[in-house]
Image: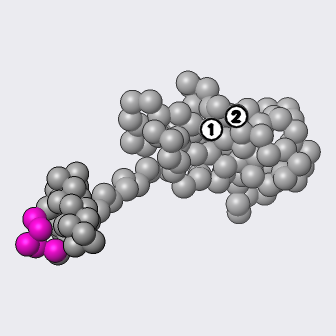
Amino acid sequence: MVVALVAAAVIVGIVLFGGDAADPTPSQTPQPSTTAAVPQRIEPPVLAADPVLDGATVVFAVENPAAADGDTLIWKLSNRPDQPEQHPVGADGVIRADGYAGSPLCVDVLIVRKGKTSEPLTACYPPAGSDG
């Protein structure tokens, strides 16, 4: 009676889950692909001109050297931890950073493409090595 129940359970298992009763080895599992997607590097933005001072506002002109559809540029003050907000760069590529008071004012500018970001372009006024 027990043997009949075991045999019935094996047959039901084969019918429900497939397989060959004579081949107790499990079916092969899919193997991972050996080719991996290589993420494309996003070229960082570049300065289109030297930063200039306009009153207490520093004006930075930036551009996207390898623009793609849907790219956006964002910037933030990089040396003002009390002002961590990110801002969009206008379509004209001009950043106007207010609050210059004699000490260097630096911005980090990034390209955002499909949810990924480039390395930042860090630009400062006065530029390094100038008498500002």
Magenta stretch encompasses residue 41: no
Report the side of 86 relative to 8 (left or right): right
Residue 115 against residue 126 in the figure, above or below: above
Q: Quadrant of residue 39?
A: bottom left
For the record, the magenta segment spans 20-24
Which residue appears at 62% of the width and 45% of the height? 109
Residue 110 picture location, percent across and down:
58, 45
Q: Badge 1 local density, few (<14 within 10 Å), some, or many (20+)?
A: some
Magenta-colored segment: predominant secondary structure? loop
Q: Is residue 20 visible?
A: yes
Say which residue label 1 marks: 74
Q: CA distance from mark 2 to mark 1?
A: 5 Å
Q: Nearer the viewer, residue 78 or 1?
A: 1
Tag 2 secondary structure:
strand
Which residue appears at 84% of the width and 44% of the height? 83
Say which residue label 2 marks: 87
Residue that protrudes farthest toward the right in the picture = 101
Residue 128 against residue 60 in the figure, above or below: below
Residue 120 picture location, percent across and down:
59, 53
Q: Earlier in the sequence, mark 2 or mark 1?
A: 1
Q: Nearer the viewer, residue 9 or 102?
A: 9
Residue 88 against residue 27 in the figure, above or below: above
Discs 2, 1 touching: Cβ within 8 Å: yes
Report the side of 68 relative to 90 (left or right): left
| Type of the residue with mark 1 | Ile
Which residue appears at 20% of the width and 67% of the height? 4
